[in-house]
Amino acid sequence: EFVTSRVVLAEALYPGSGVEVADALEAIASKSRRPRAPLGASAAWLIAYPDQFSAADRLPLAVLGSVLDSLQDVADGVHLLPMFTASSDGGFAVSDFTSVDDTYGDWSDIAVLADERSLMMDLVCNHTSTRHEWFDQFVHGHKPGWYRTVADGESVSDAARPRPGPPTIEFEGVSEAVWATFSADQVDLDYRNPAVLEAMTEVLFSLVDAGASAIRLDAVAYLWKSTTGTRLGEPNTHRIVALWRSLLDDFAPGVLLVAETNLPDDKNFAYFGAREQPEAHAVYQFSLPPLLLDALECAEASTLETWINELPSAGIFLNFLSSHDGVGLRAVEDRLGPDRIADMAQRVAAAGLGVNTYAAANGGERPYELAGTWLDLVAAQVGGADAASAHRAAYAVVYALSGIPLVYVHALCASHSDHAEANRSGMARDLNRKRLRSDEFLATFGGDGPAALMKQCCVEWRALRMHSAAFEPGSSQRADSLGPVLVIHRQHRDGKAALVAVNLGGERATVDVSSVTEFDSRWCDVDGIGLERIELGPYEDAWLYGQDG
């Protein structure tokens, strides 16, 4: 229950107008009442573009639905990347929040996806396309204050931007430079204007009405720009997230609000909020992918152990290793240090994959993102011979941890990087964004190749999670490490316990169960066979369940 009321939050954002703004937001939200069922241990989602798959004589969203139907044993949900009409950046430069790109399908296709599975959709809340009607009206003086400009005397020298170059751009007809954090085609909204917050709240609840089970706040940390400071994760940004959380809890209970903030852990987890001001229901585990790459390269799980044991217990984590973006490194700069990160990036570059950089404070450049498919990024760390096995071992950790496992389609089918498209576009991220024919994608799961083994593992891991309430998203966790072996303990509030051991190294390992568990229990595998020792081959995993008595 909120201690901080919506009026108090709105008043802090817009002094003197708190009551009117809170009333306006509630009027928008009250049109929607679409409760969603709570998540259980079976929750597992795929990540896909709306045009991820093609087939003759069918539009991509319908094809995606068919592919997901074929993968029901793998996942019960999907993170659908932006499907709105957009002008660039793979859908993240939205030009119309009311229309689905007609080359993908229409709202009826979205309804089918939402009716049959959990559906997470993106609220691209920081910016719009320069081709959005709002921006056209702004340029012509009809929507003053809708986009963030830089006033005379305001410095942008310390502005946070995950790209090289200044975060502003000049437009004909606009007297001041306009903030464009991500590209010249993505112009930042100005939330200092309450009309902007109301308009984006309309968009948020349009996604609820379209059947969203979860709403991902894309790049939300950049939302509010002050005239001083870093302009990243401003207090008013947190107040806006808290307002949206409050509205969802009251008018669309069960719909998850997800913060996407690729930041160091303390700043990332800050988006859970506090007891008196709860914010997002869920956040991404941005530290997990680079920490797992490091653990695989070192064949040493102690850094992962320490990180897991420092995680907060509140909120839901979205655990992922690969997505439409690259593997971000900013979240682990302090934990791994510049030398280990530089070594990791050097191996990735030597493998012909992408390393995106940012301008460091000393004027040099530092790696902030690794680009390539997860299989190829793993191969750069452990070598090609072990890559497929290590790829699966990393995902065993994803499924064992507290939260919801997310698997990008290219990780599921163990794709190699698309060098032809990356060379054509000049964008390293395109190494991991290849669109696929649905029949060819599904055919990769035949036989006994890497894709078939990965799919088989995902099916088994999901079934193993469903075997015990210990794997429900809110259940507690802690970790131990024995050299390359990571041991993850899970326990439900009713006392049900489980243990997962994953060998992240290329040599055999033995685990004495009694030495790594604090629970006074008999440990059995899924078939009820008691085990006191676990023998793990290279990159193997084992799942045990506590039995009382």
Image (cartoon, helix red, strand yellow):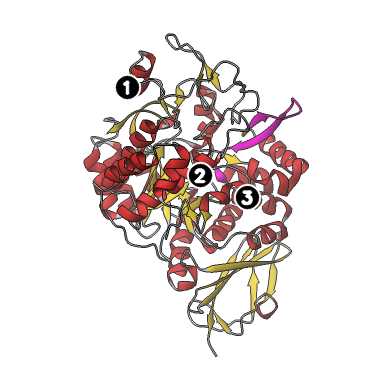
Q: Nearer the viewer, mark 1 or mark 2?
A: 2
**Helix or strand or loop: what does disc 2 sit on?**
helix
Q: Nearer the viewer, residue 243 or 128?
A: 243
* Residues tagged 2 and 3 counted as in contact (Cβ below 8 A): no
Q: Nearer the viewer, residue 37 or 519?
A: 37
**Helix or strand or loop: what does disc 3 sit on?**
helix
* CA distance for labels 2 and 3: 14 Å
**Helix or strand or loop: what does disc 1 sit on?**
helix
Precedes in sequence: disc 2 or disc 3: 2
Percent coordinates x, y for residue 387 in the rendering: 61, 50
Q: Which residues are magenta?
A: 356-374
Q: Residue at x 57, y 46 (%)?
A: 375
Give the side of residue 174 with respect to residue 479, left or right. left
465 over 228 or under it: above or below: below
Q: Nearer the viewer, residue 390 or 469?
A: 469
- Which quadrant, please, contains the N terminus? bottom left
Q: Residue at x 54, y 18 (%)?
A: 151
Q: Nearer the viewer, mark 2 or mark 3?
A: 2
Q: Which residue is mark 2?
A: 238
Q: Which residue is mark 1?
A: 133
> Identity of the amino acid at label 3?
Asp
The tag on residue 42 is: none
* CA distance for labels 3 and 1: 37 Å
